[in-house]
Image (cartoon, grey):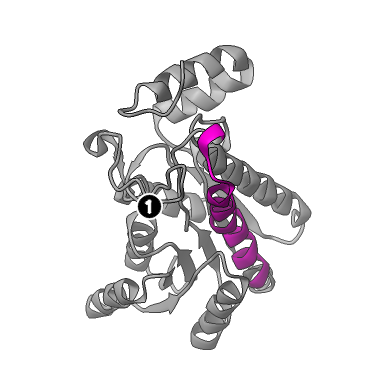
């Protein structure tokens, strides 16, 4: 990763921040993109104090012009782009029957359109550098997760978009990778939206038993270096995706029962 220019969206916390730090330590020059400018500017100060090269760009990935600005600022500062990591994302927790449609739209705007916008403007530079486009997806992008309709839909859409882009650019040297972390200790569940669009504020899961964002970042970094196509993390995640291919009807029941055990689950038996 030495001297590579890497953009990370959703870089103010969780997997995004851990990935930016990990790649900086591996010699990359990192661009931290997030809505919280103060947070990413502080992280850039910390990185620079430790001898790393970094840039903070205030970015709302649901806004096309904001994504265009992110790419322009990166080129202005570093002259090229080698890696784009589409990590920015929001989650939700409510059954579709109760859900306000604006919630679903908000998830698609961030998780799917955010990936499309950033990739669209970065693509000419990535084709030039024969670089990498990464989508941080989820097990919800491989199997439908109940009470997560908007989340699953947006992650399925991201997967379809990036899988197609990989095939389109097959002879142009572009590396396209999807990574599905499984449940990771981060603030995505605290900020998950409920039926009326407000944040749930607390996680329904035991964060202590989950993979850390730092561990995910290391797998992600190795995947870029080895130019892997797809990474599904955690044994539970791998098993879920594999079994769903062969026993989809059985897995519907298993997934429902598993998600219904969450505290205050909105699922109806």
Identify the residue at horizontal 31%, vertical 39% (top origin): 211
Indicate whether 239 appears above or below 109: above
Residue 246, picture quadrant:
top right
Q: Is residue 236 left or right of residue 243?
A: left
Residue 144, picture quadrant:
top right
Q: Is residue 108 left or right of residue 182?
A: right
Q: Nearer the viewer, residue 8 or 250?
A: 250
Which element type, helix, strand or loop, lies under badge 1? helix
Q: Which residue is mark 1?
A: 217
Specify start and end residues of the magenta stretch as a single range: 97-121
Residue 240 x, y percent position in the rendering: 49, 24
Residue 29 x, y percent position in the rendering: 41, 74
Residue 157 x, y percent position in the rendering: 65, 46
- Would you say residue 107 sits in the magenta stretch? yes
Q: Nearer the viewer, residue 22 or 36?
A: 36
Q: Main secondary structure of the magenta part?
A: helix
**Farthest-out residue, bottom:** 76
Q: Is residue 74 left or right of residue 187?
A: right
For the N terminus, the quadrant is bottom left
Q: Nearer the viewer, residue 159 or 28?
A: 159
- Would you say residue 116 sits in the magenta stretch? yes
Indicate whether 262 appears above or below 148: above
Identify the residue at horizontal 54%, vertical 27% (top origin): 241
Bin the neighbour count of mark 1 within 10 Å (Cα to Cα): few under 14, some 14-19, many 20 and up: many
């Amino acid at each position: 990763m030495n001297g590579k220019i890497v953009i990370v969206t959703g870089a103010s916390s969780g997997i995004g921040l851990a990935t930016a730090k990990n790649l900086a330590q591996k010699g990359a020059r990192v661009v931290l993109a997030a809505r919280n400018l103060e947070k990413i500017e502080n992280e850039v100060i910390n990185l620079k104090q430790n001898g790393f090269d970094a840039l903070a760009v205030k970015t709302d990935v649901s806004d096309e012009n904001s994504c265009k600005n992110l790419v322009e600022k990166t080129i202005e500062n570093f002259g090229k782009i080698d890696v784009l990591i589409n990590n920015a994302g929001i989650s939700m927790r409510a059954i579709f029957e109760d859900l306000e449609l604006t919630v679903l739209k908000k998830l698609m705007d961030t998780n799917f359109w955010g990936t499309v916008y950033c990739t669209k403007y970065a693509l000419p530079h990535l084709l030039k550098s024969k670089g990498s486009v990464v989508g941080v997806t989820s097990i919800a992008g491989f199997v439908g997760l109940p009470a997560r309709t908007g989340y699953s839909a947006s992650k399925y859409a991201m997967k379809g978009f990036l899988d197609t882009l990989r095939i389109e650019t097959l002879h142009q040297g572009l590396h396209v990778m999807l990574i599905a972390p499984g449940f990771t200790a981060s603030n995505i569940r605290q900020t998950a939206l409920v039926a009326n669009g407000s944040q749930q504020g607390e996680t329904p899961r035991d964060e202590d038993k989950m993979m850390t964002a730092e561990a995910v970042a290391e797998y992600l970094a190795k995947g870029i270096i080895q130019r892997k196509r797809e990474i599904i993390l955690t044994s539970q995640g791998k098993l879920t995706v594999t079994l769903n291919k062969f026993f989809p009807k059985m897995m519907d029941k298993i997934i429902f029962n598993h998600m219904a055990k969450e505290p205050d689950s909105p699922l109806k038996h």
